[in-house]
Amino acid sequence: MILRSLTAAAALTCSCLIAQQSKPSMPKTPTKQQLEELRTGLVEMNRTDQLHRTKVSWGTTDPKELARLKALDDDAHLEEAKRRWREGIKLPKEVEQDLMAKQRVLDEANFQRLEGWVKAYGYPDPERLGLDAPSPIAVLIHADNEWFDSVASLLREEARRGRMPAKEYAAVSDRKAQHAGRRQLYGMCRRFDPKTNKVLPPEIEDIEKTNKARKEIGLPPLEEYRIVPDKKRATSSPPEAIRQRSTPGGNGSPW
């Protein structure tokens, strides 16, 4: 009888431990100083995220030309990007490779810094940082797939809790899926078609699966879409400068 009671007690203890381990841990509450440090850090992360990437996107390293391009409004920005794409304006390959090698070093530092914050305090949301605080969305967009996969479940939980905007999580998740050769799940990424000069509806595989996933993180059903099996997946994509303006955090964002 005693042995049976001990066995039952041990099983109960084990079950409790498993339940505790499976339950997502609540982030700590940051101090006012830590919040200010994060705001400052986000400004720097957004600056370094574009430090070399913008030069490659526009095909120029000329500071005056880069300043001119940065000052364009959304419509002019899109037209200029399409013109440069049509005309094949690019930097020499070796220059691009050197710039992107430098950019990857900065990206890795940004990824690690953001991951540390999210694990400790949750997603850096505007409610805590202020509506004028910079968004870390660009850092997530440019994270490599392996790193994003390692924190995807954590970010999805942050989206479910309302700290990370659901549209941002869904958009980044879809973009990563496309980069990995998979069909997007949430239907957040649209493709620019240079032949028709139009932005096409998102390509998905299963509308029921998509709407179920959207509902889980608080998004409404997808209204406009195209059902396209993976074997017919489009391979063409817009230039980086256009994609950046078509993602959360960029001016002219459709979300």
Image (cartoon, rainbow, N blue to C red):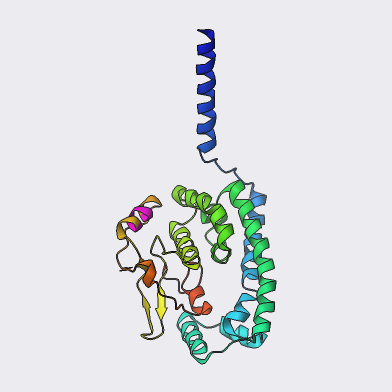
Q: Quadrant of residue 133?
A: bottom right
Is 196 or 97 nearer to us in this picture? 97
Residue at 64% x, 49% y: name it.
32
Above or below, 253 against 167 in this view is below
| Residue displayed at 57% across by 80% down | 57
Can see residue 50? yes
Quadrant hosting residue 193? bottom left
Q: In this rendered view, identify the residue nearer to me: 3 or 152.
A: 3
Q: Main secondary structure of the magenta part?
A: helix
Image quarter for residue 43? Answer: bottom right
Residue closer to the observer: 49 or 162: 49
Residue 229, relative to residue 54: is it above or below? above
Q: Between residue 49 and residue 240, name the one nearer to us.
A: 240
Q: Is residue 124 visible?
A: no
Q: Is residue 67 above or below residue 102?
A: below
Compared across the picture, whether 195 is left or right of 66 comes to left
In the rendered image, residue 48, in percent from the top left (x then y), is placed at 66, 69
Residue 149 painted magenta: no
Q: Quadrant of the C terminus?
A: bottom left
- Read off the magenta span: 210-214
Magenta-span inclusion, residue 212:
yes
Tell me what residue is drawn at x 50 percent, y 65 percent. Answer: 180
Q: Residue 6, how many percent across, how many down? A: 54, 14
